[in-house]
Amino acid sequence: MSGLARAIERVMISPANYWAGFALDGGVAAATIAVGASATPAGPAAIALALAAGAAFYSLLEYAVHRWLYHRWPTIVRRIHRHHHADVRLVQGAPCFATLGVAAVLGALAALVVDRGLAATFAGTVLAGYFAQSVVHAQLHRGRRAPRWLDGLRRHHLAHHRHDDGNYGITTTVWDRVLGTARPAAERAR
Ligand SMILES: [Zn+2]
Ligand SMILES: [Zn+2]
């Protein structure tokens, strides 16, 4: 393994990255949405559409990254994701430079088709989606202390940990059902 790969692995499994990324992603997402929504000359309907598009895009991105980057392609992140599958107490976050970088690129691409305010609203919502995923995923692994309203997602995710070849969605089960990777959640959540 190269020195760079080892450095990335060290970053990804460190609690410091997890908490720094958590705070940064949440803060930047909220600020970007607030600034974007107030800067756009577009009306509330367009802002609502940008928020919905960001949430939908995030959920598909979450599915794709987990399915292919974390489980299929022989990437360094797949190796790192194995740590979480080996020990669910190890909750890892993507390096914060990666999540912020992806959001910045998405914002720049969106700005090619809509005004900057709407583009920022869209990109901020995608980042907020990742923030929400971090919160939800940590809750899913809290055993009986997990909130009841997350039971459905918890059963879905625990089945992912058992089968390893399906249930890639964390914050939604929609893409697993649409793309044929839904696995039965036999185990009761509590
Ligand atoms: Zn996984
Ligand atoms: Zn998990």
Image: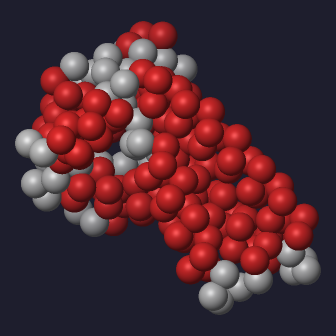
Q: Residue at x 66, y 81 (%)?
A: 111
Camera-side residue: 113 or 150? 113
The scheme the figure's colours follow is: secondary structure
Using the image, determine if residue 157 lies above or below residue 5: above
Quadrant of the image occupied by residue 151:
top left
Q: Residue at x 60, y 76 (%)?
A: 108
Image side of residue 125 versus residue 173, left or right: right
List x then y, in percent, for residue 61: 41, 61
Using the image, determine if residue 12 lies above or below residue 53: above
Q: Is residue 115 visible?
A: yes
Using the image, determine if residue 190 lies above or below residue 51: above
- Residue lying furthest bottom in this view? 113
Camera-side residue: 131 or 96? 96
Q: Residue at x 8, y 42 (%)?
A: 1
Q: Quadrant of the C terminus?
A: top left
List x then y, in percent, for residue 55: 59, 60
